[in-house]
Amino acid sequence: MHAYSALSGFTDGDLPLVDEQLKFLLQISSEKERQFRRVVEIAGLPDFESAISERRLKVDRLLEIRESPECREFRDWLSTIDEASDDDIKERINSLRAKFGNAVRSYPGRAVRLLTTTGIGAIPGVGLVAGFAASIVDAFLLEKVLPRSGVVAFLSDLYPSVFEDQVG
């Protein structure tokens, strides 16, 4: 098969259908790539082409993050921004609320939240009630006021991690 550049399992009558299916898949992937390049450009992030030519791409890291929840959320979001303006995209990826929401879910952010609620709970006299109230406020803030954004996490943390630092 490889020696003759042939596909098995198809008849001559199937070729137009297979050709159209392949064109459709190519069109979809080209559109997703265009949207990805648009977001990377708006965000001011490095692109793959220059990193590959300069041998600065960490392929193992890229393979590691491609199935992360943040990357999946980013891919889902990419398919919804066809009609979005550049300003809308900038607003989403530079959202202070989303960045702060991601920060309070990081390891240091969780440690600060734990120390705060534990410290409040240790206050003599009102500690137990105040600690319980602080835990409720903490949960409310995380769920309603400061939601986690996989899009922002992907663009600010994961995507830059696939590039080697440039040695200057």
Image (cartoon, rainbow, N blue to C red):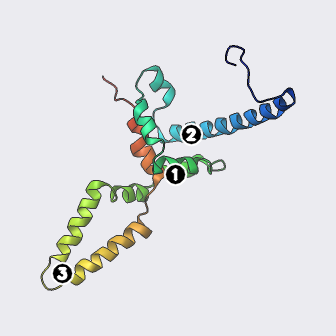
Image x and y of residue 54, in percent: 43, 20
Residue 113 is left or right of residue 64, and the answer is: left
Task: Point out the frontmost of discs 2 and 1.
Answer: 1
Question: Residue type at mark 1?
Answer: Glu
The CA span between labels 3 and 2 is: 50 Å
Give me the residue at 65% from left, 35% from top.
30
Between residue 28 and residue 34, name the one nearer to us: 28
Secondary element type, mark 3: helix
Q: Which residue is mark 3?
A: 127
Give me the residue at 42% from left, 49% from top.
153
Image x and y of residue 62, in percent: 44, 36
Furthest residue to the left?
124
Work out whether mark 3 precedes mark 2 in sequence or the reverse, and give the earlier one. 2
Image x and y of residue 156, in percent: 41, 45
Between residue 110 and residue 17, name the one nearer to us: 17
Give me the residue at 62% from left, 51% from top.
80
Question: Residue type at mark 3?
Answer: Gly
Work out whether mark 2 precedes mark 1 in sequence or the reverse, and give the earlier one. 2
Which of the 4 image quarters holds residue 143? bottom left
Question: Residue type at mark 2?
Answer: Phe
**CA neighbours of label 2 inside 10 A, class few (<14), some (14 to 19), many (20+):** some
Q: Is mark 3 in CB contact (under 8 Å) with mark 1?
A: no
The CA span between labels 2 and 1 is: 13 Å
Which of the 4 image quarters holds residue 112? bottom left
Between residue 34 and residue 58, name the one nearer to us: 58
Secondary element type, mark 1: helix
Q: Which residue is mark 2?
A: 36
Q: Which residue is mark 1?
A: 73
Circle count = 3
Residue 110 is left or right of residue 22, and the answer is: left
